[in-house]
Amino acid sequence: MAETGKIFHVRCVDNTLQRDTLSLGRVYEVTRDIERDGYYELSGLGRFSRSRFEVVETSDDTAEVRQTSRSK
């Protein structure tokens, strides 16, 4: 579980019905975790169901996270 108020990263594991916005396997930056409603707010993209993502640990794919953050 991520800390409240912290920016963290998640990897998309389900892009069903969101293929035009989300890419399967891509890492995204979460700017707000709306746990009560079951959503993540992604930087510049809006809100998406938490079930579409898995949290990327800081030691997990650090280079990929940095590369994805720069490509925005």
Image (tube, rainbow, N blue to C red):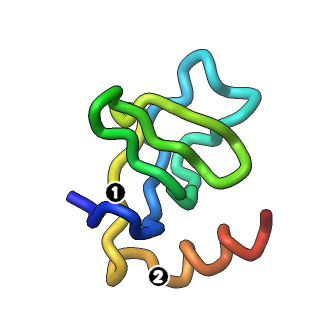
Q: Looking at the image, which is closer to me, 7 or 72? A: 7
Looking at the image, which residue is at 44% across and 56% down?
A: 10
Would you call the spot at circle 2 few (<14 residues within 10 Å), some (14-19), or many (20 or more)? few
The quarter of the displayed image where residue 16 is located = top right
Q: Is residue 46 above or below residue 59?
A: above
Residue 37 image offset from top left, x and y in percent: 34, 27
Residue 49 image offset from top left, x and y in percent: 43, 29
Looking at the image, which residue is at 36% across and 79% down?
A: 58
Q: Residue furthest left?
A: 1
Q: CA distance from mark 1 to mark 2?
A: 12 Å
Q: Is residue 16 above or below residue 59?
A: above
Give left or right: position of 9 versus 59.
right
Residue 50 image offset from top left, x and y in percent: 37, 36
Looking at the image, which residue is at 56% across and 74% down?
A: 64
Would you call the spot at circle 1 few (<14 residues within 10 Å), some (14-19), or many (20 or more)? some
The quarter of the displayed image where residue 43 is located = bottom right
**Which corner quadrant holds the N terminus?**
bottom left
Amino acid type shown at disc 2: Thr
Q: Looking at the image, which is closer to me, 67 or 37? A: 37
Dot 2 falls on a residue whose secondary structure is helix
Give left or right: position of 34 versus 63.
left
Label placed on residue 55: 1
The quarter of the displayed image where residue 63 is located = bottom right
- Earlier residue among tags 1 and 2: 1
Residue that carries the numbered disc 2 in the rendered image:
62
Q: Is residue 6 above or below residue 42?
A: below
Amino acid type shown at disc 1: Val
